[in-house]
Image (tube, rainbow, N blue to C red):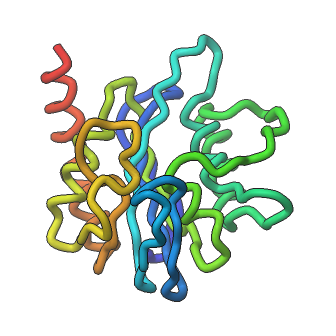
Amino acid sequence: MNGEHITLSCGTGKQGSYLLFIRLDKPLQLTFGHFLKGRPLFLEAGSYLYAGSALGKQAGGYPLARRLLRHTARTGRKKPHAIRKILLSVLREKGLAPERLLKPAEKKLHWHIDYLLDRPEAALVHILIIQSPEKLEPALARFIETAPETSIPAKRLGAQDTKAGTHLLSCSDPAALLGRLRAELPHLVTETASHAD
């Protein structure tokens, strides 16, 4: 996506929502834990998007940094995603991560997205970060779910802790979607904040 890896947008604070852009180098059959009662789901090679959030309220915590760094890790001795070093540099530069990170606990597969990001065929290629204490994840998921560039591999995929929607989608043109999303973000944030009041 034009050599860019991180888009940091809107607001301030150490909480927020995000959109992960993932490239799958070859098709695969993948089981997402207990999703679909453990039956594997076929994923075509191509681009995928995942909407998530990290809104932890712990004083002095770094919920957004911790969640994003978790996404860039893999289990066991597998190499992390290449974007990890760039992400950490951006997070530190913007004051979103401490200079010294505690060694993370061994990653265990828990969220649906963990199962995809743990695979060597999957590469995390871009992260859109939205700093905001507002719960933007549902609005962000609705935006990408209704975009003409996206399609749903399976209803509710990636949305195990929400009441509706699908948060992991395939995408035919991630660059076009990212461009439109950058333009729409201020409106999306304002609209979500006004509904929260």
- Image quarter for residue 104? top right
Percent of width and height locating residue 106:
80, 45
Query: Is 51 displayed left or right of 14 in the figure?
Result: left
Give the image quarter of residue 180.
bottom left
Query: Residue at (53%, 27%) from the top-left corner?
Result: 14
Residue at horizontal 41%, vertical 76%? 47
Q: Position of residue 162 (x, y in %)?
A: 33, 37
Q: Is residue 30 left or right of residue 164?
A: right
Q: Residue at x 19, y 19 (%)?
A: 196
- Residues 85 and 52: in front is 52
Residue 29, above or below 39: below
Residue nearest the viewer, comparing 84 with 73: 73
User: Which image quarter is the C terminus in?
Assistant: top left
Res 190 → quadrant: top left
Vertical comparison of 44 with 14: above or below: below
> What residue lies at 19% left-to-right and 40% top-to-bottom?
188
Q: Quadrant of the N terminus?
A: bottom left
Total marks in image:
0
Q: Is residue 77 left or right of residue 56?
A: right
- Residue 69 % position (x, y): 65, 47
The vertical placement of 4 against 143, above or below, is: below
Q: Is residue 104 left or right of residue 43?
A: right
Rendered view: 107 above or below 152: above
Residue 25 lies, in percent from the top left, at 54, 85
